[in-house]
């Protein structure tokens, strides 16, 4: 892919208003790829409730490194914390009544109309978001986007998938085959045989 085309695609992505739930931030941090969010989108917003949930990880041995990394990104200013307005608080409470929606996801969904893209991994939240008409992408989609935009090699892409599984990110075998097939078609398109 030519650099001018690649730069135009990345510029379009960087101009999106993006909000994230906890899961993509934590898993990308665990596999050492949190900076992909900055490289792709420039700025990512998180609700205050999500920031608190992640930063609470400093008290846990398995969440400490991710919490510190996210805290650093907030301090650097490319992850921005956003609070709800009164109507959004009401919506978040309503959405959280659904048994498949966790509190952080409910807040992201309530804030959704302010954003172009929601970062969600949980199937229930993704289904709910689609029903509300939101554009969504999850951790795997972010990694695939990074590969498609030549921010990583095919081997790095595959390594990310294996690393996610190592950290208990469940990927259905059928979905994994589809994702790798998509990445292989991107590799062919890019001429990286």
Image (cartoon, rainbow, N blue to C red):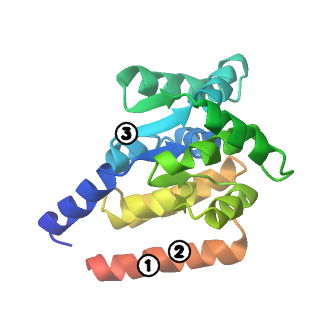
- Residue under circle 3? 43
Q: Residues within 10 Å of mark 2 (few under 14, many from 20)?
A: some
Residue 57, x across and y down, in percent: 68, 24
Q: Secondary structure at mark 1?
A: helix
- Does residue 28 appear left or right of residue 10 in this picture? right
- Residue under circle 1? 184
Ranked by sequence position, the earlier of labels 1 and 3 is 3
Q: Residue at x 47, y 37 (%)?
A: 45
Quarter of the N terminus within the rendering? bottom left
Q: Residue at x 50, y 22 (%)?
A: 71
Q: Residue furthest top?
A: 59
User: Which mark lies nearer to you, 1 or 3?
Assistant: 3
Q: Relative to 65, is 25 above or below?
A: below
Foreground: 128 or 56? 128
Foreground: 68 or 112? 112
Residue 77, x across and y down, in percent: 37, 26
Ranked by sequence position, the earlier of labels 2 and 3 is 3
Q: Secondary structure at mark 3?
A: loop
- Residue under circle 2? 180
Marks 1/2: CA–CA distance: 6 Å
Q: Relative to 134, is 59 above or below?
A: above
């Amino acid at each position: 892919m030519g650099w001018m085309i690649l730069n135009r695609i990345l510029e379009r992505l960087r101009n999106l208003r993006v909000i994230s739930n906890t899961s993509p931030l934590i898993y990308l941090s665990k596999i050492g790829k949190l900076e992909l969010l900055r490289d792709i989108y420039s700025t990512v917003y998180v609700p205050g409730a999500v920031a608190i949930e992640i930063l609470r990880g400093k008290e846990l041995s398995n969440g400490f490194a991710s919490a510190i990394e996210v805290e650093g990104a907030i301090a650097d200013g490319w992850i921005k914390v956003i609070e709800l307005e009164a109507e959004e608080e009401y919506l978040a409470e309503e959405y959280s009544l659904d048994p498949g929606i966790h509190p952080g996801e409910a807040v992201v969904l309530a804030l959704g109309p302010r954003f172009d893209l929601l970062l969600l991994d949980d199937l229930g939240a993704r289904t709910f978001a689609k029903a509300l008409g939101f554009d969504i992408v999850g951790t795997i989609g972010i990694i695939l986007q990074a590969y498609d935009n030549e921010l990583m090699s095919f081997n790095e892409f595959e390594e990310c998938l294996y690393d996610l599984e190592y950290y208990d990110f469940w990927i259905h075998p059928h979905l994994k085959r589809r994702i790798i097939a998509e990445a292989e078609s991107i590799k062919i398109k890019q001429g990286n045989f």
